[in-house]
Amino acid sequence: MSADSVINFVDAVAVYNEYPALAGVTLNVERNEIVLLQGPNGAGKSTLLRACAGLMPVIRGTANVLGFDLTVDRESVRERVGLLGHQNGLFGELTIAENVSFWSTVVGASPQERTSAMERMAIDGKLASRRVSELSAGQKRRCALACLVVRRAELWLLDEPHAGLDAKGRDEIDRIVKEAAASGATVVVASHEIERAQQLATRTVSLVAGQVRDSQ
Amino acid sequence: MSTEAQTFKGVGTPATRMYGLMAIVALGWVLLGGLIFTPEDAVQGDAVRIMYVHVPTAWIAYLAFIVTGVASACWMIGRKHSLGFDRVAGASAEVGVVFMAMTLLSGSLWGRITWGTFWVWDPRLTTTAFMFVTYIGYLAVRGLGGTAQQRARRSSVIALLAVLEIPLVHFSVVMWRSLHQRATVLSPDGDIKMDGLMLFTLLFGVFGFSVLFAWLVSHRQRIMAMQDARQTSALDVAVAERLKEAQA
Amino acid sequence: MSMSVSRIARAVAAKDLRIELRSRVVSNQVLPFSGLVMIMFAFALDNDDVLQRVAGGLVWLATLFSLFILVQRTFAVETYDGALDSLRVAGVNPQGIFIGKSVALFVQLLVLESVLFVAAVVLYRVNVNGSGVVLLVTCVLCATAGLAFVGTLYGGLTAGARGRETLLPLLLLPVVAPVLICATRATESAFRSGGVTVGEGWPWVGVLAVFAAVFGLGGLLSFGSLIEE
């Protein structure tokens, strides 16, 4: 494991309801990489991302993320990792501005960081004052990403970020991912969108039946 | 798969067989003594014999509560978070719930026979009823699933919160019942004059039931350890199958 | 860098209260429900003297029934779009979340109880004056704090996964029993029901304060473990 290794899993096993969603994952991701995680449904992509975020226990093998040993302590790593799962983690009755403001406050971001995050997600003042429950899937996704950006995470874990978005929305996701990597973050994207994501990623990792099959 | 092929030898050891025997002997004496050898009470008559079951089971109910609390604290404090403590906590709760039910039933019957009512708002009985429901909740939380450590973490917190809650309940009920002067008279074991044999049988009953409790808990927690071990080997099998899936 | 617990708590409490103001679940659903419960008690008990005598208990019973709905609502807000998970992943200090949600629940409970006490005065014809008011207000504040802490704590455990919500009443009712016993006795003292003096109510308030302190501290220490997967 080099000093620049952001994710280092060796034969990691993670269970969900007694089923080994990860059956021995060996994976190494270096700093500033953009990794595409692909594989069929049920391969364990979501589980792998959640395990990297310290949300799921890894019960066997080695699992180091950003220098933290997840088999011992999976809570300290969370501050430095950002996960965008299938759900957006937003509050429907609040506006975009209020959602981003809430997340900025609880993670200690400054007002400038908050405005800059909304700008990066191309959220203008008019959109920001609309309630999240009234938005389209793509707009909700952008709001969720703004809440993620404001956290200045070193490792971004995005689970199917393009899902439910139109072409314009998908382009914006790609732009955001590239910007994040350019500003020093490491990004792992789980996606079915193989062609699009291959333009985006520096490396592709294929996950099948809870193990890494190959990576290019 | 190979674990099934091993002959099942049972969870007993020489030590548990010894105190299992002690429990049988002690409880045998309590049965004989309680039903035959001890005299009946001047006031209550033969009804007093329920005391030989009711008082020890109440004592065990409280003991189980303490054991679960202490074991949960031990799990939490130890740096290794040894699962053995969690299993003892769970086993003690399961056995304890049964004894709590027995306490409530015997107390209820006793009240019915001596005072004509199935229930008295006696602080001890009321607190035992609360303990009973609280521990049913604790066992439900234990059944929520997840890995053994996840289960242990949740359960130990709930058990320690119960340790905070039960004394508060008891204290509130005592204060409450003290408003109603009649309650102290209604406590069934309030005015029994105990002669030597009755006292001995009662204490021997406490001893016998305690040994029974220890026997039940040690067996139950060994079975739990085996269940955990089987879950681990089932996991090995599942992992191997999933690895084969990838080859296919 | 981690944020201070008080900032997190303030943000969470403000967020919860703002959501309630927008969605109006408490005012449009819970308050009518609890008002109805008070009326149902009158139907069931059908005796003005009895109602006046037990009014204190009925108010707190109606509060407890509504507590379940309030607790489930406050966590439904978090689990609907996975916000609680996001809070965990972001490494937000769970103590801040606990305090924030308890404060919001406290405020909602206070609103509920105020309406219930007005209903008791109107429907059950109780009255409060002088030192009784001081006792009643103190009792309500202490009892509500205890209920808010306990509701948030056990609500956090039972939030989310299917089949868990049904655990909430089973876990919560035994724990809130001391609050019911003590708050009812103190309230009866404040109402001077059945000849009880106001002075006799204060020891009960003492127990309520201890309960709130115990579960406030206990909750601070354990909330993080209970919302964890």
Image (tube, rainbow, N blue to C red):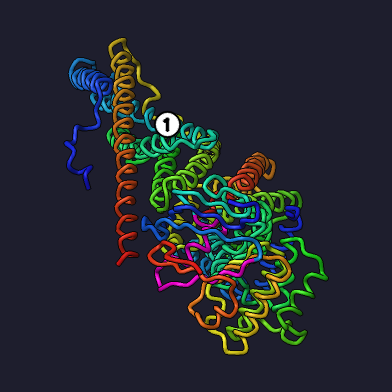
Q: Give the residue type that dot 1 points to.
A: Tyr
Q: Nearer the viewer, residue B106 or C1?
A: C1
Residue at the far bottom in the pictured view? A167
- Per the image, the residue denoted by label 1 is B62
Q: Secondary structure at mark 1?
A: helix
The x, y position of residue A4, in whole percent, is 65, 56
Q: Nearer the viewer, residue B7 or C143?
A: B7
Residue at the far top in the pictured view? B196
The x, y position of residue B170, in whole percent, is 51, 36
The x, y position of residue B223, in whole percent, is 29, 38
Q: Which residues are magenta?
A: A33-56
**Horizontal arrangement in the rendering, residue B135 relative to residue C119 (left or right):** left
Q: Is residue C180 above or below residue A169?
A: above
- The answer, for residue A88, to whether it is visible in the render is yes
Q: Is residue A39 above or below residue C190?
A: below
Q: Which residue is pictured at 43% across the width and 72% down the height?
A: A39
The x, y position of residue B168, in whole percent, is 55, 39
> Residue B44 lies in what quarter of the image?
top left
**Horizontal arrangement in the rendering, residue C198 relative to residue A59 (left or right):** right
Mark 1 crowd level (few <14, some 14–19, many ≥20, 10 Å Cα): some
Q: Nearer the viewer, residue A119 or B128?
A: A119
Chain under label 1?
B
- The answer, for residue C191, to whether it is visible in the render is no
